[in-house]
Amino acid sequence: MRAMTQADVDAVLAIEQAVQRFPWTRGNFIDVLNSGYVCRVDEADSGEIRGYAILMPAADEAELLNIGVAAAKQRKGLGRAMLGEMLEAACGMNMKRVFLEVRPSNAAAIALYRSAGFSEIGTRRDYYRNADGCEDALVMAYGLKDEGNG
């Protein structure tokens, strides 16, 4: 994985639009890059962007804002590798915890997060748009450092 650049936005946006029912916009990706968030892409030797992940650090915690893998590259361990890289980045910034929100209907993502050590800590009501209006979000957290060792 490497740092995402403005030149990657078209490829990242194409993946996002193909794999998300309610995708981020070009402006969303430009904003996170301009804000200095941890933005990474997974690039094949051929130069093809296969996935991306965005982490927003804040104080001593971080939030995984978005992670996506090209449809043809899913179920091959790439999402797990990218998640691991984001957790390592957060640890390297001395973060204590990483949070994320996930749709309850996204069983594959929930299984990935649970297997990586995330636990459910709450629900955000009507957080996501969907075809019927809104869908709740499960809030999950992963502890990087023991609160007493910070």
Image (cartoon, grey):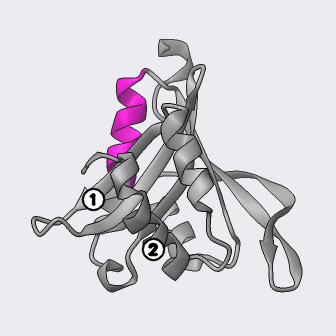
Q: Magenta stretch: residue 86 in it?
A: yes
Up-down relation of residue 51 to residue 148 (above or below): below
Which residue is denoted by mark 1 in the rendering?
Answer: 42
Answer left or right for 72 relative to 131: left
- Majority secondary structure in the magenta region: helix
Q: Magenta stretch: residue 51 in it?
A: no
- Residue name at image x 35 percent, y 56 percent: 8
- Residue name at image x 52 percent, y 35 percent: 34
Answer left or right for 29 relative to 76: right
Mark 2, Cα crowd under 10 Å, few <14 / some 14-19 / many 20+, is some
- Mark 1 belongs to which amino acid? Asp
Q: Can residue 75 be seen from the camera position used here? A: yes
- Mark 2 belongs to which amino acid? Ala
What x and y, as percent, mark residue 144? 46, 33
Question: Magenta region: which residues?
Answer: 83-93
Of 7 and 66, the residue lying toward us: 7
Q: Residue furthest left?
A: 45
